[in-house]
Image (spheres, rainbow, N blue to C red):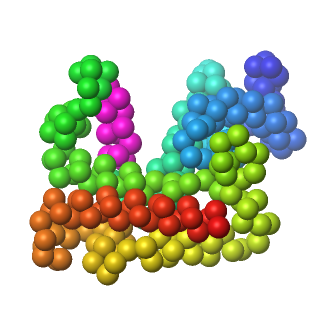
C-alpha cells in the first residue's frame, strides 16, 4: 500500500491530480483509525476522533513535499496525532477552562503516572509541583480544572451492559440545537448550587480567576475555596447526569 500511496502523492503534487489526492486519503484512513484508537476511552467517541484525525491527514497530504525524500508516514503521524491532542485540549471540556490550565493538567497527568510508578504511592502536591516546575497553587488549580473535563459522553451506555446510550434517551438529534443542549445541562448543574457556590464556580470557570483571587473576592481562605469548588463540581456532575438521563 505504501508504494501505491507514494505514487498517488506524487501524482497529486507534481501533476495536480485531485483524483489521486482523494484516493490517497481513502487509502490512508486505516492509519488515522489506528492512531485515533490509541485515544479511545478518554470520553470521546472513536468515530469523532477519526474525523478529527482525518483533518490532520488532509493537512499532511496537502502539505507533504514529495521531493524531500521523507517517508509520508513519518510526516503524517505527528500531524494527525497533533490534531487529535488539540481536540482534547481545546474542545473536550464541559466548561470553559483557560488553555494554560488545560495544558498543565495534561502534563500533570503524565507526571502523576510517572511519580506514582517511581514512588509506589500517589505523589504530594509539592512533589507534583517540583516535577512540573510550577507553583503548588498552579498544581491545585490544574487538578481542580480536571473536574470540568467531559462531564459524560452522550454516546456512553446508560447502564453497565446496556446497549442504549444517553443520546438515544434524549431523542433524535435536532440540527443546530447541540449548543443549546449543552448550555441547558450546564445550567441544570449550576441550579444544584447555592448562591456562594455558584458565584465561586462562575468566577473560576467563566472569569478565569485563580483560587487565591477568588478567596480575596469572596472573603474566605483559599483552602475553603478549593473545598467548595470540589464539592460544587461533584454536585454539578450529579445534576447534569440526572438531567441527561431523565
In the figure, residue 123 lies in which quadrant?
top left
Find residue 174 and report its horizontal and vertical position in percent. Answer: 76, 72
Residue located 77% across and 37% down the image: 25
- Residue 59 or residue 77, whichever sits in front: 77
Furthest toward the right, the residue is: 19
Q: Is residue 113 magenta?
A: yes
How many discs appear? 0
| Left or right placement of residue 10 versus residue 120 in this view | right
Query: Is there any visible trace of residue 134 in the rendered image?
Result: yes
- Residue 78 or residue 132, whichever sits in front: 132
| Left or right placement of residue 178 versus residue 3 in this view | left
Query: Is there any visible trace of residue 9 in the rendered image?
Result: no
Find residue 237 and report its horizontal and vertical position in percent. Answer: 47, 60
Assign the C terminus to one quadrant of the image.
bottom right
| Left or right placement of residue 27 versus residue 33 in this view | right
Find residue 87 and report its horizontal and vertical position in percent. Answer: 54, 50
Residue located 75% across and 24% down the image: 6
Residue located 26% across and 55% down the image: 141
Residue 118, above or below 146:
above
Majority secondary structure of the magenta segment? helix
Assign the N terminus to one quadrant of the image.
top right
Find residue 26 and report its horizontal and vertical position in percent. Answer: 82, 36
Residue located 12% across and 66% down the image: 221
Q: Is residue 133 magenta?
A: no
Residue 83, above or below 118:
below
The magenta stretch is 103-114
- Residue 146 or residue 1, whichever sits in front: 146
Amino acid at each position: 500500500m505504501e508504494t501505491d500511496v507514494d505514487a498517488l502523492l506524487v501524482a497529486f503534487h507534481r501533476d495536480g491530480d485531485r483524483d489521486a489526492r482523494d484516493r490517497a486519503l481513502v487509502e490512508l484512513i486505516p492509519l488515522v483509525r489506528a492512531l485515533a484508537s490509541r485515544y479511545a476511552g478518554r470520553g470521546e467517541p472513536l468515530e469523532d476522533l477519526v474525523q478529527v484525525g482525518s483533518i490532520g491527514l488532509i493537512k499532511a497530504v496537502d502539505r507533504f513535499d514529495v521531493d524531500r525524500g521523507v517517508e509520508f508516514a513519518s510526516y503524517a503521524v505527528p500531524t494527525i496525532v497533533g490534531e487529535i491532542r488539540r481536540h482534547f485540549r481545546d474542545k473536550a471540556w464541559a466548561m470553559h477552562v483557560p488553555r494554560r490550565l488545560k495544558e498543565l493538567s495534561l502534563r500533570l497527568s503524565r507526571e502523576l503516572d510517572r511519580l506514582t510508578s517511581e514512588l509506589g504511592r500517589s505523589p504530594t502536591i509539592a512533589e507534583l509541583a517540583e516535577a512540573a516546575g510550577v507553583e503548588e497553587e498552579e498544581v491545585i488549580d490544574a487538578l481542580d480544572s480536571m473536574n470540568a473535563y467531559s462531564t459524560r459522553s452522550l454516546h456512553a451506555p446508560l447502564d453497565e451492559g446496556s446497549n442504549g446510550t444517553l443520546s438515544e434517551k434524549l431523542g433524535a438529534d435536532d440540527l443546530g440545537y447541540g449548543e443549546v443542549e449543552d448550555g441547558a445541562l450546564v445550567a441544570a448543574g449550576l441550579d444544584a448550587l447555592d448562591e456562594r457556590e455558584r458565584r465561586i464556580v462562575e468566577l473560576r470557570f467563566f472569569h478565569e480567576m485563580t483560587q487565591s483571587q477568588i478567596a480575596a473576592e469572596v472573603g474566605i481562605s483559599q483552602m475553603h475555596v478549593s473545598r467548595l469548588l470540589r464539592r460544587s463540581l461533584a454536585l454539578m456532575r450529579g445534576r447534569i447526569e440526572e438531567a441527561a438521563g431523565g
